Image (cartoon, grey):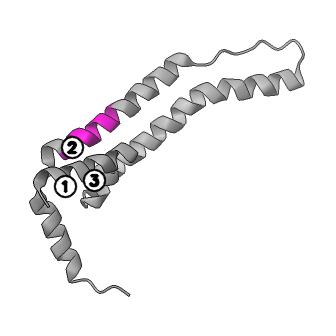
Amino acid sequence: MSKTSGKIKYLAMNLLAPGIAQFALHWWLRGLLQLGGAVVCFILAAWCVIGPLVHNISRMLNDDSAKIENVNFVGFFYYAVALIVIWIWSILDIIIFYSPKQTVENNNENEGECSD
C-alpha cells in the first residue's frame, strides 16, 4: 500500500469521528483527547439548544405566567467552534505525523500475539 492511500484511509476514519484514526494507529492519548473532547463539545452544544427548551416546558407546566427562556446561541457557537477545532486537529495530526512505517511496526507487534 502506498503512503498516500494509507493516509487517505486514516483521513477517512477521522471524517467519521475525530480520534478514530489515532486509535487505529495506536496513538491512544491523542485519540482519547480528540474523541473525548469531541463528544463533550457535542453534548454541551446540544444542551445549549435543548436545555432552555426543557426548562421552558417544565416552567410552563408549573406556572401559566412563566417567562420563556431563549436558546443559548452564544454557548452553542463556542462549543461548535471547539468541536470543529478538535476535528481539524485530528485531521492535521494524520497529515503531519503519519508515516507508513508506523503501521508496519504496529502490524508486526500484533502478529506475535495469540488470538483466541
Q: Residue at x 14, y 67 (%)?
A: 104
The Cα–Cα distance between marks 3 and 2, rounded to whole angstroms, is 8 Å
**Do labels 3 and 2 touch, CB within 8 Å?**
yes
What residue is disc 2 on? 93
Q: Position of residue 56 (x, y in %)?
A: 76, 22
Give the mark toward the camera: 1 or 2: 1
Q: Earlier in the sequence, mark 3 or mark 2?
A: 3
70 part of magenta stretch: no
The Cα–Cα distance between marks 1 and 3, rounded to whole angstroms, is 13 Å
What span is colored magenta in the figure?
85-94
In the image, residue 115 above or below residue 44: below
In the rendered image, the quadrant that contains the C terminus is bottom left
The Cα–Cα distance between marks 1 and 2, rounded to whole angstroms, is 14 Å
**Do labels 1 and 3 touch, CB within 8 Å?**
no
* 69 relative to 59 in the view: left or right: left
* 68 relative to 30 in the view: left or right: right
Label number found at residue 6: 1
Q: Amino acid at mark 3?
A: Gln
Q: Position of residue 7 (x, y in %)?
A: 19, 50
Q: Amino acid at mark 2?
A: Asp
In the image, residue 63 above or below residue 38: above
Q: Residue at x 26, y 46 (%)?
A: 11
What residue is disc 3 on? 22
